[in-house]
Image (cartoon, rainbow, N blue to C red):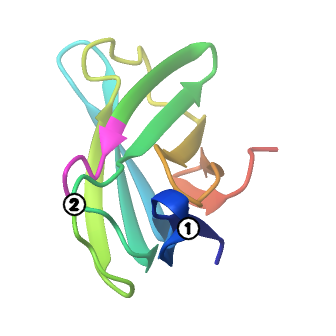
Amino acid sequence: MRSIFFCVVMLVACEVRERPAVRYLSVTTRAAPTAFGYELSVTTELEVIGRMPHVAPHVKVDAACGNQTDTENAFFMDLSDAQVGDRKVSTAKLFGMRELPDAPGQCEFTLSLTEGATGPERFCYQNGATTPGKCK
């Protein structure tokens, strides 16, 4: 785990602070019909692996289904003060305002913690299943 060194003015005292970090445990996607097309629900389960501050980051979910894209936030205000080992679940609704015209056959998602030590991770929704990595 990477740490940031925080030193008080004039190097009187130093303390090591962990950066916020998560591990994505599972990502599931469900396409649901709406009055004008389809929307996607992306449910993410994660484990906190770096303690979260009181004002914690959230997870940005970027989706690309063919030439259509959408972005939504997950875990908004849900990770505040979370401790290492805590598990959380959140669902992001995508394409709710600009529905997809047909049920998507394939979509790529990128999950990004808005700050901290966890880099962006990609997932592929294809044939009704969501798997880690880019779509092929």
Res 98 label: none
Question: Left or right: 55 with respect to 100?
Answer: left
In this rendering, does residue 40 appear at all?
A: no
Figure check: 36 above or below 71: above
Residue placed under numbered mark 1 in the picture: 11
Crowd class of label 2 (few under 14; some 14 to 19; many from 20; radius 10 Å): few
Check disc 2 and report its element: helix, strand or loop: loop
- Name the one closer to the observer, 98 or 71: 71
Q: Give the image location of residue 54, x and y in percent.
A: 21, 60
In the figure, is residue 17 to the left or right of 117? left
Residue situated furthest bottom in the rendering = 85
Give the vertical position of 34 relative to 17 (above or below): above
Residue 90 lies in quadrant? bottom left
Inspect the magenta stretch and tell me whether residue 77 lies in it. yes
Whether residue 50 sits left or right of residue 97 in the image: it is: right
Magenta residues span 73-78
Q: Residue at x 63, y 48 (%)?
A: 120
Total numbered labels: 2
- Residue drawn at (30%, 55%) of the image: 56
Q: Is residue 107 above or below residue 87?
A: above
On residue 54, the disc is 2
* Residue 51 at x, y percent in the picture: 38, 75
Q: Is residue 22 visible?
A: yes
- Along the line of sight, the residue nearer the viewer: 60 or 50: 50
Callout 2–callout 1 Cβ contact below 8 Å? no
Amino acid under label 2? His
Measured Cα–Cα span from mark 2 to mark 1:
25 Å
Q: Which secondary structure type mostly characterizes the magenta part of the structure? A: loop
Disc nearer the start of the sequence (2/1): 1
